[in-house]
Amino acid sequence: MQTAYTVLILLTLVGVSRLMARVIPIPLPLVQIAAGALLAWPSLGLHVALDPDLFLFLFLPPLLFSDGWRMPKRDLWRYRGPILTLAVGLVIFTVVGAGFFIHWLLPTIPLPVAFALAAVLSPTDAVAVSAIAEDRLPVPIMRMLQGEALMNDATGLVTFKFALAAAMTGIFSITDASLTFLMVACGGLAVGVALSWLVGRLRGWMIARGWDDPATHVVFMLLLPFAAYVLAERLEMSGILSAVAAGMMQSWVDLLPRQTTTRLLNRSVWALLEFAFNGLIFLLLGLQLPDIVTAVTHNEVTLWPTLLWRCLDVLAIFVVLAALRYVWVRSVWRLMVQIRRWRGRADDSLELSRRSSMLLTVGGVRGAVTLAGTLSVPILISAGVAFPERDLLVFIAAGVILLSLGVACISLPLLLRGIASEPDLRMKREVRDAWKRTAEAAIHALENEGLNDTTATPDAAQEVLATEVKARIMSEYRHRLEIFNDTAEAQALAFQMDQLEKRMRISALRAQRLELYNLHRHRQIGDDVLRLVLAELDLNEANLGLGK
């Protein structure tokens, strides 16, 4: 029962923290970390023993799956060069540069362990950045941060595992590590895509046989990220990349017929799941803070001087991480822009000003992956041999997470000052074109019903138009009266009219949806436009009582 009470308390606190963030001018992640730390205060005494493997399995797959699902694939492909340099090149650059610095700053940390710590400090959290920036970041920068966060989780954790193995065995081969990394990454992507495709085919087979219960399909969708993660890990591939790939594939597979109610339910369930899990992650970080501080100072004679020096170490490491990120962004981006100019493919969206470089640097906020990875460090290397400076590693990781969040909370509003929160003009244009094309498709579908085959002269056309408008208005009043008419004939007539109207409206809506899918298939609209228009079409169909 104690576990159930703890879960209920944490979920309640997630909801309360959201309300507090509306009143307190502090970003939600910091409010939740503070609430967790307060809850762990000795007077309240809530203690949660965090199992890193369970944490990785329970929280990361669904959140990464959801991020992959929502990530606009066209933008991901458009910014593939910058995203890959951030997700792969910057991680390696950080591991080498920060690893040597950590070993120099803290000689008690062996070099392989320092590399492992630098690797686990590399993954970023775009969800926290989005919450802090309140959707005011320029679209290209936000897309780069989202793509980086999707990819560098796997890069950082795989590199972390290699460095950890080297620290425990003393054996490391860069050739073997590179080949293993490629196999693990590509294998994870392949597992996620294949499993998501199979689930999509299974759902299509079920729908064709009338097994289209929304709750059943949503349960399959909830289980998919966990299945992708577990299967990839069992095959010694990247479970994180598998969950991301499954989400990205599912955004294509999920455009199934007769699934309107399922999509509506699925959106609501995933919105609730993301809100609860993101809140729980930061609450758990706050709950771990007292134990982390106690562990790093328990062998010291004096508490506060030791804690102060440790905090200065964390600050120095954070500054070096930020400097490495800024240097990488400025130098590599200049090189990329120059190369594109030489090739005659200049792109203004890749021109980075000093402010844009600072936004990308400050936007590299650390989050759940860093915490979970650090806590997964084993306590013992072998029987009776403790892992070197494990408590210090956890303290540094927690400190870097807090510092990155705090700096982002202060710096992002300042850097965004003077930048108007302008809507995405491309998206607005595509939304307008999508509604226009789908409306034309609906009109065409209604014309094919054979109800508007009357030809008329211009004068007669005006008369017909006036009659049609008058009949539409009068029919609404007649329908209201017929609801209260208890004769069987009147009720049958009203029922027939309702069915006819619903059939026509359903035909028009489904024609709109097919045209929308066609626009997306031919890459005339992006995933974000598809989701926006499809959500409204689904809602309109569900309001008719026939959505499935």
Image (cartoon, rainbow, N blue to C red):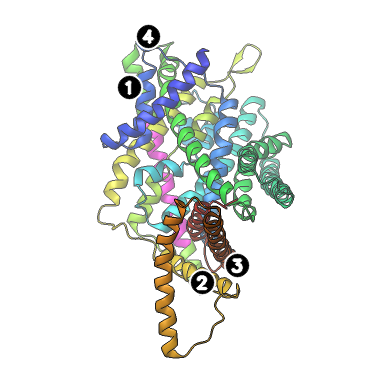
Q: Along the horizontal axis of the image, is 407 left or right of 517?
A: left
Expressed as whole percent of the image width and height from the top left, the position of residue 60 reads 55, 36
Expressed as whole percent of the image width and height from the top left, the position of residue 199 reads 70, 46
Q: CA distance from mark 2 to mark 1?
A: 63 Å
Circle 4 residue: 301
- First of labels 2, 1 by sequence position: 1
Other residues around mark 3 within 10 Å, as few (<14) / some (14–19) / many (≥20): few
Three-letter amino acid code at disc 2? Arg
Q: Along the horizontal axis of the image, is 335 left or right of 53?
A: left
**Element carrying mark 2:** helix
Mark 2 or 1, closer to the camera: 2
Other residues around mark 2 within 10 Å, as few (<14) / some (14–19) / many (≥20): some
Circle 1 residue: 308
Mark 1 or 3, closer to the camera: 3
**Element carrying mark 3:** helix
Circle 2 residue: 437
Other residues around mark 4 within 10 Å, as few (<14) / some (14–19) / many (≥20): few
Dots 2 and 1: beta carbons under 8 Å?
no
**Residue 180 is a magenta residue:** no
Q: CA distance from mark 2 to mark 3?
A: 10 Å
